Amino acid sequence: MSENRREDEVAKSVGEEYPYVIEMCNITKEFPGIIANDNITLQLKRGEIHALLGENGAGKSTLMSVLFGLYQPEKGEIRKNGKVVTIKDPNDANALGIGMVHQHFKLVDVFTVLDNIILGVEPNTAGFLKKKQAREKVLGLSKTYGLNIDPDALVENITVGMQQRTEILKMLYRDNEILIFDEPTAVLTPQEIDELMEVMRGLAKEGKSILFITHKLNEIMAVADRCSVLRKGKYIGTVNIADTTKEELSNMMVGRDVKFVVDKEEARPKDIVLELNKMSVKGARGKKDAVHEVSLNVRAGEIVCVAGIDGNGQTEFVHALTGLIKVDSGSIQLLGENITNKSIRYRNTHGISHIPEDRHKHGLVLDYSLEENMVLQRYFEPQFQKGGFIRFDAVRKYADDLIERFDVRSGQGAITTSRSMSGGNQQKAIVAREMDREHKLLIAVQPTRGLDVGAIEYIHKQIVNSRDSGTAVLLVSLELEEVMSLSDRILVMYEGEIVGELDPKTTTVQELGLYMAGAKRQMRREEAK
C-alpha cells in the first residue's frame, strides 16, 4: 500500500464525517504570459456531482490537471478528508483514489478495450499476466454501472461514446473514488449524453464524488448538485443548483447577460451556390454506401442544416464536399462549376470555407504557432509573401487582428503553440480563420463544439451575418437547439440518405428526432407497401 493510501485510511478513521472529500485551497498556477488559476479554492463533498463552469480559457482544465498531478501549482495545497496530501504525478492521484477522463481521450487505438483499461495496472503473478481475472473484474464493473462494452473490440473500431465508457471503466478498475470528467459531452451525440448523465447519477449514488467540467448549462441543471464558476482564472462563487437558474449561471460565467435565442431576420435566398446531384460515397472497406444518391442545393443568403445522429454519413458527406475523400458517383457543382474532381486547394481558393468536425485532425497543425495556423490556406497569397518568402510581419499583424476580433485567448498571443491552448480557444481560432477568408460557401461542422455560452452567442451571430451578406451556409450539427434556432431549412440524414426536409418554424424537436431515428422514413415505407 502506498504512503498516500495509508495516510488516507488514517484520515478516514479519524474523520469519517468530514464534509469534504477533496479541498483545493488557494491554488495558483502560472504559465508564460498568463495566470491560469489565481488563488482558487474548491471544495468537493462526498457523493456529490460538482460542476466546474467557466468560459474557454477560464482555467477549469488547468485546475483539474493540478488535482490529477499533471501540473504542480506555484501556491496552495490539496487536502483529502481534511488531511494535506502531495500529488506529484497521476500515479499519486490514482493512489489517492483520484481518476480523470480527459477532454481528448488517452487511449491506444491498436489495443483492445480490455488492454486499455488494465494498462499500467495489469494483474500478474510472478510476471505472468492474469488477463482472465482482469476481464471478470471489468465485466463486473461494466454490469454494475450499466457501461456495456465489448472488451475484445479494438479502440480504433468503436464509437466515441464507447471510448468514453472505456475511459470511465479505466477509473473504476483502479478503484477511484473521486472522478474528474473534463468536458465529457463535447464529442457525444444527444443520446450518448443522456446515457452519460445516467451513468454519472449512478456513480454518485454508489458514493463516488464527481467533478464535472462543462460549458453546457442544460447539463449542469440536469445532473449537478453544486456548481463553482471561474472567470479569467479567478474564482467567482459556488451555488446550489436547486437555488439558481441558467441565466444566473451564464451571468456569473461571462459577467454579462447572454441571449439564448438567435436573433435573425427572415432569410432571402438568392442564386444556387452549391448543388449536389445524386452524390454517393462508398463506405469503409467496400461496405454499402456511406452516402447514397444525395441531391440538394444551398442558396446564397440561407442557412441549410444537415441534421442527424452521429454515424449516419454526415462525416463522409462533408469530406466529399471538401475534397478529403473521393466521390464514387454523382456530381458537386459550386456556382455552376463542376468541382467533383477538383483538389482541396482549388475548392479553398474558389469559395469554400470549412470549419471541420475534428479540430485536431483537420483544423490545426498542433505544433504550429497560432499565427501560422491562421494563414494555413493563405500563406501563398500576395498579402503574406514576396518573392517566394513569407512576410512574417504581415502574418503577425493579420493573426493579432483575428485574435482580438474573435477573442481567442492564449498565453503568448500569436506565437502561442496551438497544442497548448484550451479546446474552446482552438475552435475559436479555426472559426476566425475560416469565416474571415473570402468565401461563397461556408461548411460549418459542429462550429460551437466545446465553446462556452458567450462564444456560442458570438459565433451564431457571425454565421447569421455571413448569411445576410450573401454567403451560402451549410451547417452540420448534432445540437438540436442549434439546429432549430440557426437553420432556415433542415435536411435530415439517416443511413446516408436525406429522409426529410423540414421547416424549423413549423416543426418540433420531437418530429425532428423521429426523422433522425429513421422512424418517419420507416413509416413512409410501410405506407408504400
Image: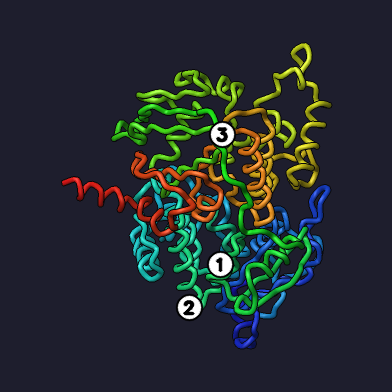
Of 496 and 469, which appears nearest the observer? 469
For the residues marked 2 and 1, what is the alpha-carbon distance in whole angstroms? Answer: 13 Å
- On screen, 384 above or below 138? above
- On screen, 179 above or below 11? above
Residue reaching furthest top?
387
Q: Mark number for residue 472?
A: 3
Picture quadrant where residue 392 is located: top right
- The residue drawn where x is 41% and y is 49% is 309
Kind of residue at disc 2 = Lys
- On screen, 301 above or below 482? above
Q: Mark number for residue 9?
A: none
Q: Position of residue 108 (x, y in %)?
A: 48, 46
Picture quadrant where residue 360 is located: top right
Q: Is residue 361 visible?
A: no
Circle 2 packing at 10 Å, graded few (<14), some (14-19), many (20+), is few
Q: Badge 1 is on which residue?
A: 179
Evaluate if marks 3 and 1 touch, with contact meaning CB atoms under 8 Å apart.
no
Looking at the image, is mark 2 or mark 1 nearer the viewer? Answer: 2
Q: How is the image coloured?
A: rainbow
- Say which label, 2 or 3, has the lower sequence index: 2
- The residue drawn where x is 39% and y is 63% is 147
Q: Badge 2 is on which residue?
A: 205
Q: Position of residue 433 (x, y in %)?
A: 68, 35
Looking at the image, is mark 2 or mark 3 nearer the viewer? Answer: 3
